[in-house]
Image (cartoon, helix red, strand yellow):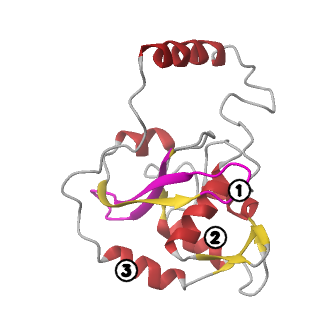
């Protein structure tokens, strides 16, 4: 099990360079009724360690997030620290990510709900309870066979004007003060 951000397998630079064996790609509805949409996520297996991991891939309605792989054992460890019958906010999931986007935890909670690991608290869109046992979920994921080809992106291909705007936005983000508490990848989504 990986326990800290400096381990070679979980460092963002190392993990993004590794091609995981893709086991599943699915979508999950976002939690916020103010910004409906869905998230595409993937579950994969590390080709050397065989560690199972999850990452968020796309948001069809905006909102920045980290695309880093998070080991399922790390998810289990964190969820094991939470009380079974006590509701909690998405912010309880923040420590799963080394990336600093404010949407990571809320988007992750949406994915966990789609996978059945978390359940919604009635009439409380942003509160969660533990769902199916995480051990059972990990066991089921471990039985998945590798996908032959990854599904196509659900996002439309950008046209020339969209590409120009994207390039301009990237240039502008280079001038964001790195010491500022608000960074270019922390657009609030209010879903945590």
Q: Using residue 53 as the reference point, say whether residue 165 is left or right of it.
A: right
- Count of numbered labels shown in the rendering: 3
Residue highlighted by disc 1: 32
Considering only vertical position in the picture, is 183 above or below 93? above
Question: Residue at 57% of width from left, 18% of height from top?
Answer: 170
**Relative to residue 189, is residue 141 drawn left or right?**
left
What span is colored magenta in the figure?
30-58
Residue position marked by numbered label 2 in the rendering: 78
Find out whether the residues at labels 3 and 2 contact each other: C-beta distance under 8 Å.
no
Q: CA distance from mark 2 to mark 1?
A: 23 Å
Front residue of this view, candidates 65 and 26: 26
Tell which tag, 2 or 1, sits nearer the viewer: 1
Q: Position of residue 39 (x, y in %)?
A: 52, 52
Going from N to C along the chain, the mark reached first, 1 or 3, is: 1
The residues tagged by marks 1 and 3 sit, at their Cα atoms, a distance apart of: 28 Å
**153 up-or-down from 181: above or below:** below
> In the image, is residue 46 part of the stretch drawn in magenta?
yes
- Point out the frontmost of discs 3 and 2: 3
Q: Secondary structure at mark 3?
A: helix
Outermost residue on the left side: it is: 148
Q: Is residue 75 at least partly visible in the picture?
A: no
102 up-or-down from 140: above or below: above
């Amino acid at each position: 099990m990986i326990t800290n951000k400096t381990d070679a397998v979980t460092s963002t630079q190392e993990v993004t360079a590794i091609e995981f064996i893709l086991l599943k790609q699915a979508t999950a509805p976002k939690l916020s009724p103010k910004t409906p949409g869905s998230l595409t996520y993937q579950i994969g297996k590390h080709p050397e360690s065989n560690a199972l991991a999850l990452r968020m891939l796309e948001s069809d309605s905006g909102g920045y997030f980290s695309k880093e792989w998070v080991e399922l054992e790390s998810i289990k460890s964190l969820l094991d620290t939470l009380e079974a019958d006590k509701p909690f906010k998405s912010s309880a999931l923040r420590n799963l990510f080394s990336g600093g986007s404010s949407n990571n935890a809320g988007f992750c909670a949406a994915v966990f709900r789609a996978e059945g690991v978390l359940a919604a608290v009635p009439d409380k869109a942003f509160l969660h309870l533990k769902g199916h046992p995480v051990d059972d979920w990990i066991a089921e994921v471990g039985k998945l066979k590798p996908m032959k080809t990854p599904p196509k992106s659900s996002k439309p291909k950008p046209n020339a004007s969209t590409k120009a705007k994207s390039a301009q936005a990237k240039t502008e983000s280079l001038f964001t003060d790195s010491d500022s508490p608000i960074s270019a990848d922390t657009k609030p989504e209010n879903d945590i």
